Image (cartoon, rainbow, N blue to C red):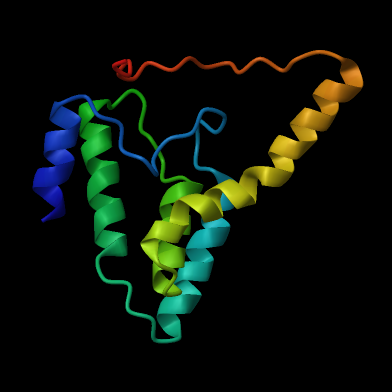
């Protein structure tokens, strides 16, 4: 089930969320902490079917697509697996990700206010332009 979806997404040049990171070009050390939490959850009897197989297949597919730059599993992948294993409703994942980042966003806002200088993002939106 996952293989046709992954292969199709990569064939169309889509990014696979949960893999790669702008800062960490090697494995994100925070991801390892979450992976241990998932292993503990599984050991306690939680049913997390296919998580390991999905991760392994996607990592291999990404390596085949771009052998010069393998993308490692990141925090978002493991966080989603962990939240799912804890029984958190999937529609709550995005708000949980946002709340987790709120402290950092607040710190940036306070820094901008203190220095009187805007922090400019180092990336640009490249998605579809909304109609209207």
Residue 49 occupies which quadrant of the picture?
Answer: bottom left
Camera-nearest residue between 132 and 14: 132
Instruction: Name the residue: 48% across, 61% down.
Output: 35
* Residue 58 shown left or right of residue 96 in the figure: left
x, y percentage for residue 69? 36, 26
x, y percentage for residue 103? 73, 45
Relative to 24, residue 31 above or below: below
* Tag count: 0
Relative to 59, residue 65 above or below: above
Residue at far bottom of view = 45
Residue at far right of view = 114
x, y percentage for residue 121? 61, 18
Instruction: Name the residue: 71% across, 39% down.
Output: 104
Q: Quadrant of the C terminus?
A: top left
Relative to 77, residue 25 above or below: above
* Residue 34 shown left or right of residue 80 in the figure: right
Camera-nearest residue between 72 and 113: 113
Q: Quadrant of the N terminus?
A: bottom left
Camera-nearest residue between 107 and 92: 92
Instruction: Name the residue: 12% across, 48% down.
Output: 3
Instruction: Name the residue: 35% across, 32% down.
Output: 70
x, y percentage for residue 37? 53, 69
């Amino acid at each position: 089930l996952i293989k046709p979806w992954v292969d199709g997404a990569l064939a169309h040049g889509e990014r696979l969320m949960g893999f790669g990171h702008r800062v960490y070009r090697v494995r994100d050390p925070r991801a390892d902490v979450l992976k241990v939490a998932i292993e503990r959850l599984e050991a306690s009897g939680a049913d997390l079917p296919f998580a390991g197989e999905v991760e392994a297949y996607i990592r291999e597919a990404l390596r085949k697509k771009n052998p010069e730059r393998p993308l490692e599993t990141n925090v978002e992948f493991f966080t989603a697996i962990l939240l799912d294993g804890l029984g958190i409703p999937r529609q709550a994942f995005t708000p949980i990700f946002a709340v987790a980042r709120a402290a950092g966003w607040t710190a940036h806002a306070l820094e901008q206010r203190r220095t009187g200088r805007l922090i400019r993002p180092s990336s640009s939106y490249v998605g579809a332009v909304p109609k209207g």
